[in-house]
Image (cartoon, coloured by chain):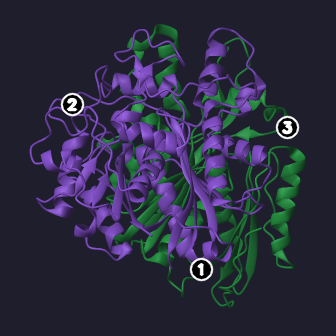
Chain colours: A purple, B green
């Protein structure tokens, strides 16, 4: 059974909207800027992929709800789909409306009376409820995955699983994340962040920058899409996932779980790894991640790597949204034939020169998107052109 | 869809009445039910868990009990854990000093354990699980979502067996939120703990989970009643496991697991039983247990 994507929606630090984000990305621009959502004084890092919310929303929803809603509306419009009661959701986040939880705790420490509306909306599930309320529908089964930085890829993969097993014919899948101080402080204290440019897969990489955003995709069986006259954009052909038990924050140096995920995704797609033209990689730019990830790619592809880019140099690391955002960017490569430049690259890790710098010899027909996360979550998605 | 064979269970219940100090020290402490310290003692010395939050210990104990009761090959064993508040203790332990004393007070001893899937990761490591693993977020109904994930993996062959669990820990920040939302005035008794089920495809297992029903979400009490009623329409005339009294200690996803375990214990031979799992916050769900000799209706999956 073929599963196709008929709608894409994206809110990223580069822009709101898929086309606007893509234009800036392939032009080599980035969306990293000084942090304003909280005061970063005292932290090592003072920049992030922050999305300016202008004009400031007048309702009481957290930032994550706004991102999710905007991405969902764009995806639904492209798919020409009205959300209906019973429409399943497969979404992901790591922190949801955490800034409301922070404000709740801050209120106690400052002896302020907590705002009830904010308490009720800090929980990550509330973004799903905000989506339903705003778009006036009641979702069918609504699954929210929180597998750290692989969450978004897991949400799309889980959606594929539900469609392949006949538990749904169409659904919304994606991820959302908003910057918040708790998570920022965490990455800062782990010394995983940098205040320089992000340099994924570069010898001189010094860490990641955080980002925020959301991506939503309309996934449906090809039969369902044909029945309602929806135009397929690409096929989501494969998904694989595996757990790395090496360490809670650091991937196993040999990248075995990533390799298993990627191989499983290829097998499910009915493709050999050599068929993959391009990988939209996790590529955080941290000292530990990139070599482990590269080892995983070598285990799957051998010495001849496909084209590889990490788009985090432009968006920052959007954590629970990253897998979904990067999936949309991988789909854009299939749709446009373009591969974005590798931002921040000065001196590639040995063996990656061609993978990171070469232009595609022909428009990519098969692309993968990969993610690794805290707790050893690894996931890979394989998309094919129509 | 493949029915789920219920092979074994593990439980870390909240058995100890305790008082949990509030964030404002002048306020009366919260009445709660806690896990007895000896229940998770074996995990205090486990290297991966030595610095982990209590929720990781609860989850490790419940999952280990289940796999000890019915050993299955670990290399094809998946893990799905549902959480409501998740790692609230370490989240506050990490962030409160940051608010009080600034960024230099942030401690990496706590931060990785603030993410939802941290305890799942620890348990995967302790049990040697390298396959599929998801952390799901939701209330009691998320336990049924976790079972849906397990059933999907078993149907696709992603795993041969799956540990499905719910785990919660207590912290004053979450309890202050429940108090502010009025839950505690309505008799809600917060608890901590974990519950785990080991499920597989074995058709001759004594108990099968034949139906998983995930109902609509709700925001208001009226919507909640409507959502739970919509789920109940699938029960037909079959017996329904009675809901716990309102005074029963509640640990959201763990409570859902305990409820399923209690229903399974009560399931007579050659019978079926619906187990409603109305969520406290936004979810509504139910499942149907069926004992071995009763014909399993594999076509009756419902989604309200």
> Relative to B85, is A205 on the left or the right?
left
Q: Mark 1 vs mark 3: same chain?
A: yes
Give the residue at the far right of this rendering: B222
Q: To which residue does mark 3 refer?
A: B186
> Whole-percent x and y of residue B29?
70, 23
Q: Which element carries disc 1, helix, strand or loop?
A: loop
Against B37, is A136 above or below?
Answer: below
> Whole-percent x and y of residue B283?
73, 53
How many other residues sit within 10 Å of disc 3, few (<14), some (14-19) or many (≥20)? few
In the image shown, does B203 or A207 lie closer to the viewer? Answer: A207
Instruction: State how many labels appear.
Output: 3
The residue at 28%/21% (across/down) is A196
The CA distance from mark 1 to mark 3 is: 37 Å
Q: Mark 2 vs mark 3: same chain?
A: no
> Relative to B288, is A263 on the left or the right?
left
Against A220, is A352 above or below?
Answer: above
Q: To which residue does mark 2 refer?
A: A205
Which quadrant of the structure image shows residue B236?
bottom right
């Amino acid at each position: 059974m073929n599963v196709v994507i008929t709608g894409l929606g994206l809110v990223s630090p580069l822009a709101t909207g898929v086309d606007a984000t893509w234009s800036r990305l392939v032009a080599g621009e980035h969306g990293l800027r000084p942090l304003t959502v909280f005061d970063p004084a005292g932290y090592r890092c003072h920049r992030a992929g922050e999305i300016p919310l202008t004009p400031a929303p007048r309702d009481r929803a957290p930032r994550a709800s706004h991102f999710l809603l905007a991405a969902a509306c764009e995806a639904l419009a492209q798919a020409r789909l009205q959300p209906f009661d019973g429409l399943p959701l497969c979404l992901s986040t790591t922190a949801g409306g955490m800034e409301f939880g922070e404000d709740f705790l801050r209120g106690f420490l400052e002896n302020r009376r907590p705002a009830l509306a904010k308490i009720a909306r800090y929980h990550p599930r509330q973004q799903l409820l905000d989506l339903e309320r705003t778009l006036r529908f009641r979702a069918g089964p609504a699954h929210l995955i929180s597998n750290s930085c692989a969450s978004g890829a897991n949400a799309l993969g889980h959606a594929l699983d539900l469609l392949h097993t006949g538990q749904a014919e169409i659904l919304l899948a994606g991820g959302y994340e908003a910057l918040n101080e708790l998570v920022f402080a965490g990455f800062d204290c782990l010394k995983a962040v940098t205040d320089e440019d992000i340099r994924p897969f570069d010898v001189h990489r010094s860490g990641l920058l955080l980002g925020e955003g959301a991506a939503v995709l309309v996934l449906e069986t090809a039969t369902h899409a044909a029945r309602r006259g929806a135009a397929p954009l690409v096929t989501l052909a494969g998904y694989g996932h595996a757990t790395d038990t090496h360490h809670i924050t650091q991937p196993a140096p040999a990248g075995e779980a990533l390799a298993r995920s990627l191989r499983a995704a290829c097998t499910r797609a009915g493709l050999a790894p050599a068929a993959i033209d391009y990988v939209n990689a996790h590529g955080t730019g941290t000292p530990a991640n990139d070599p482990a990830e590269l080892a995983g790619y070598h285990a799957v592809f051998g010495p001849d790597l496909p084209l590889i880019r990490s788009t985090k140099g432009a968006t920052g690391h959007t954590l629970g949204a990253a897998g979904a955002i990067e999936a949309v960017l991988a789909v854009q490569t299939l749709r446009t034939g373009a591969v974005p430049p590798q931002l921040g690259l000065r001196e590639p890790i040995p063996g990656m020169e061609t993978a990171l710098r070469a232009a595609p010899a022909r428009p990519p027909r098969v692309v993968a998107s990969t993610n690794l996360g805290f707790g050893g979550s690894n996931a890979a998605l394989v998309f094919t052109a129509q | 869809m493949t029915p789920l064979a219920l092979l074994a269970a593990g439980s870390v219940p909240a058995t100890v009445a305790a008082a949990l100090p509030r964030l404002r020290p002048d306020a009366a402490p919260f009445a709660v039910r806690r896990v007895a310290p000896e229940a998770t003692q074996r995990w205090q010395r486990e290297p991966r868990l030595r610095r982990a939050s209590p929720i990781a210990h609860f989850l490790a104990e419940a999952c280990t009990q289940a796999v000890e009761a019915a050993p299955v090959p670990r290399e094809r064993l998946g893990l799905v854990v549902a959480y409501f508040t998740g790692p609230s203790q370490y989240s506050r332990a990490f962030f409160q000093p940051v608010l009080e004393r600034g960024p230099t007070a942030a401690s990496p001893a706590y931060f990785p354990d603030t993410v939802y899937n941290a305890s799942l990761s620890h348990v995967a490591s302790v049990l040697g699980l390298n396959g599929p693993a998801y952390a799901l977020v939701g209330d009691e109904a998320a336990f049924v979502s976790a079972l849906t994930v397990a059933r999907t993996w078993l149907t696709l062959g992603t795993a041969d067996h799956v540990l499905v669990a719910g785990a919660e820990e207590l912290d004053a920040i979450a309890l202050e939120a429940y108090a502010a939302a009025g839950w505690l005035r309505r008799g809600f008794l917060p608890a901590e703990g974990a519950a785990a089920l080991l499920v597989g495809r074995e058709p001759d297992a004594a108990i099968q989970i034949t139906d998983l029903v995930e109902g609509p979400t709700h925001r208001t009490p009226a919507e909640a009643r409507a959502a739970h009623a919509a789920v109940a329409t699938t029960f037909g005339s079959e017996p329904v496991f009675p809901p716990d009294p309102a005074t029963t200690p509640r640990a959201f996803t763990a409570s859902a697991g305990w409820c399923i375990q209690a229903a399974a214990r009560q399931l007579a031979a050659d019978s079926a039983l619906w187990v409603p799992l109305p969520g406290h916050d936004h979810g509504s769900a139910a499942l149907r247990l069926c004992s071995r000799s009763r014909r399993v209706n594999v076509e009756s999956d419902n989604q309200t």
